[in-house]
Image (cartoon, rainbow, N blue to C red):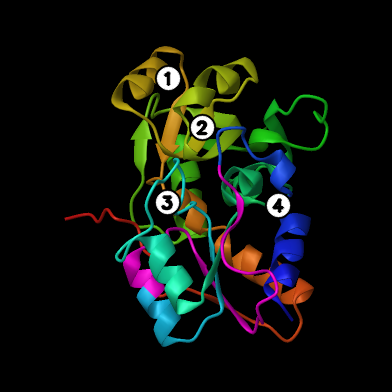
Amino acid sequence: MFVADLVRAMETIAPTRLAEAWDNVGLLVGDESAPLGRVLLTIDCTRAVVDEAARGRWDAIVAYHPPIFEPTKRFVAGSIAYECARAGIAVYSPHTAFDVAPGGTNDVLAEAIGMAAARPLRPAAGDAAAVGIGRVGDIEPAPIGAVTERVKVALGLSHVLLAGPHDRVVSRAATCAGSGGDLIADAVAAGAEVLLTGEVRHHDALRATALGLSIVATRHSTSERCALPALERRLAALLPGVAIGRSAADRDPFVFA
């Protein structure tokens, strides 16, 4: 197979047309005609991940966060894009297209919180029934403490951050992978009592509390990394004969100290 086959597979899973207009998705480094035998999945394409890919002779990296984001005038030694190109490693990023697409990050979070019949929290224009930012739906009624424990077990976490009302039973939830502060009003308008996300700013947490919305924050990349196992399975099915693996060097930059 070739890098072009990876591009087609990712387009099937997370069509680039679904990405936010400000985003930079698709094949960012590499040659579509290059052979493809090994694909490494990661959230962040850090230097440690690039070194891991080079040592392991991986042909391509699928990095959820795009390593090239803003206009860049120079590609010099030491930059991620330069080092990947020099090593012959293609880089593909799905980012917000994977958030929006069915089976992507927000659907994984919806499953983690036990959401039934999830639908887009902020539907995309002209495609309201299928895709959109975030997810919202009913969950089995439970105390907020039990909901946070459910999330921790599902995502393999020892801690989450909880803001807003702590002592009530909730039955409707919303999810937003990454940073969810911009969807607080949407969550409240949709009747959600709790929003599962990666992070919110301090003042957004205060705003959510004032509106009666509980926030469960897992840390930014932790809310996204949980989707990699499902992506690994889907790519393996679409790229038979290609080895698909998850980076051992990829990790959240924050730890609990």
Residue nearest the observer in this picture, 189 or 6: 6
The residue that appears at 38% across and 24% down in the rendered structure is 164
Indicate whether 231 appears above or below 203. Answer: below
Q: Is residue 10 magenta?
A: no
Amino acid type shown at disc 1: Ala
Q: What residue type is labelled 3?
A: Ser
**Residue wearing tag 4:** 14
Label 4 to label 2: alpha-carbon separation: 23 Å
First in residue order: circle 2 vs circle 3: 2
Q: Which of marks 3 and 4 is in front?
A: 4
Local crowd size for mark 1, using a 10 Å CA cut-off: few (<14), some (14–19), many (≥20) = many
Q: Does the rendering let one see residue 249?
A: no
* Residue 163 picture quarter: top left
Amino acid type, mark 4: Ala
Q: Mark 1 points at which residue?
A: 208
Looking at marks 3 and 1 on the same chain, the residue that comes earlier in the sequence is marked by 1
**Which mark, residue 195?**
2
Which residues are the magenta region?
24-50
Category of crowding for the residue at label 4, using alpha-carbon neighbours closer than 10 angstroms: few (below 14), some (14–19), many (at least 20): many
Mark 4, mark 1: which one is toward the viewer?
A: 4
Disc 3 secondary structure class: loop
Residue named by callout 3: 221
